[in-house]
Image (cartoon, rainbow, N blue to C red):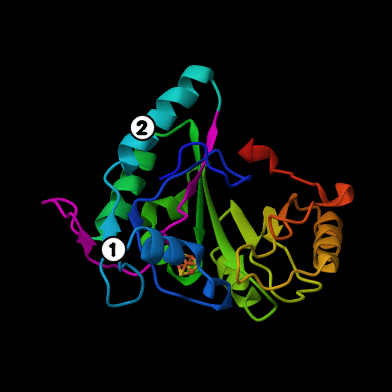
């Protein structure tokens, strides 16, 4: 969707479709749902509603690839801010003969990655459904994952840390955890198998408070376990203290 994403940890955001269903406490104030319902007057959230295909998604990705290749750089692409790439299959609006569901859109992305059409793009696939990852990626990837694909999950408190454990259980090499929006203390956690941690508090009118001590704690946990750490925001309003202005990336993601 967005050109020059405003999300600090990626270069662009692309959505193959819009729409989703809530999974855990981190979804409570889902900004994507709010945007879709109020600004665009769509009805795309929940199990019963169909999803909306974003027709420009692949032409955008093709363009990002060309630009990055020309510049000799790599772009980090977040998939996606208005969807969950590992959501269970659903019908879509604007179907064609070959693309009639979110599963076919997902498959089209896998095929293009597999055919080396996006070698200058690094895909950050962030999901709240890590239990679906191994079921929904090509089985051939389990013999050798594409280097330019990262799999991440979002957690919000110690109760939702189980999603990170499910992610770790995939044993995929490139894994990351986004602790955002963090809404309660998490404390000591085992990051074995996790290659990158992003952390941030909630923003918006209904934001739940973020205790800055949670950030100092996570910074310490990441340093102790030698995991790159990226602190995104307190609430997008309060300034980030200088000693928390840490925005690291894994070496093989740069
Ligand atoms: S998984 Fe993401 S897009 Fe889906 S409802 Fe939750 S916050 Fe919104």
**Residue ID at (32%, 40%):** 58
**Residue visible at 10% across and 51% down in the picture:** 97
Magenta-colored stretch includes residue 82? yes
The x and y percentages for residue 212 are: 83, 65
Please report the bounds of the magenta region as a residue range: 74-100
Q: Residues within 10 Å of mark 2 (few under 14, many from 20)?
A: some
Query: Which mark is in front, 2 or 1?
Result: 1
Which image quadrant for residue 33? bottom left
| Residue underneath mark 1 | 51
Q: Residue 57 is drawn in which quadrant?
A: top left
**Residue drawn at x 43%, y 51% as measured from the top left:** 141
Along the viewing direction, whichever of 210 and 223 lies nearer the viewer: 210
Of residues 204 and 188, which is closer to you in this image? 204
Label 1 SS? strand
Mark yes or no: residue 131 visible: yes
Q: How many discs appear?
A: 2
Q: CA distance from mark 2 to mark 1?
A: 23 Å
- Residue pushed farthest top? 70
Q: Secondary structure at mark 2?
A: helix
Please state, as top left, top right, bottom left or bottom right, where the N terminus lies in the image: top left
| Residue 133 showing in the rendered view | no
Task: Name the spot of residue 180 as percent of width and height, x first.
Answer: 64, 64
- Residue plotted at (64% across, 66% down): 181
Residue 16 in picture, x, y percent from top left: 34, 51
Nearest the viewer among 64 and 106 is: 64
**Within the image, what quadrant is residue 56 found in?**
top left
Q: Which residue is mark 2?
A: 62
Q: Would you say residue 75 sits in the magenta stretch?
A: yes
Q: Is residue 93 left or right of residue 148?
A: left
């Amino acid at each position: 969707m967005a050109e020059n994403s405003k999300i600090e940890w990626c270069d662009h955001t692309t959505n193959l479709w819009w729409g989703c269903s809530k999974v855990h406490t981190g979804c409570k104030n889902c900004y994507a749902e709010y945007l879709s319902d109020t600004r665009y007057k769509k009805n795309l959230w929940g199990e019963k509603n169909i999803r909306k295909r974003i027709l420009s998604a692949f032409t955008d990705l093709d363009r990002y690839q060309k630009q990055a290749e020309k510049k000799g750089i790599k772009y980090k692409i977040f998939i996606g801010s208005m969807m969950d790439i590992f959501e269970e299959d659903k019908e879509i609006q604007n179907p064609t003969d070959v693309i009639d569901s979110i599963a076919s859109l997902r498959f089209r992305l896998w095929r293009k990655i597999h055919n080396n059409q996006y070698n200058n793009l690094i895909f950050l696939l962030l999901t709240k459904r890590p239990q679906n990852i191994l079921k929904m990626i090509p089985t051939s990837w389990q013999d050798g994952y594409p280097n330019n694909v990262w799999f991440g999950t979002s957690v919000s408190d110690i109760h939702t840390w189980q999603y990170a454990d499910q992610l770790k259980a995939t044993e995929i090499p490139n894994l990351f955890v986004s602790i955002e929006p963090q809404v309660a203390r998490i404390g000591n956690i085992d990051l074995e198998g996790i290659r990158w941690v992003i952390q941030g508090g909630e923003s918006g009118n209904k934001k739940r408070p973020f205790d800055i001590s949670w950030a100092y704690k996570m910074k310490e946990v990441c340093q102790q376990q030698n995991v790159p750490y990226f602190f995104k925001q307190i609430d997008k309003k309060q300034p980030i203290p200088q000693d928390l202005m840490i925005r690291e990336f894994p070496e093989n993601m740069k």
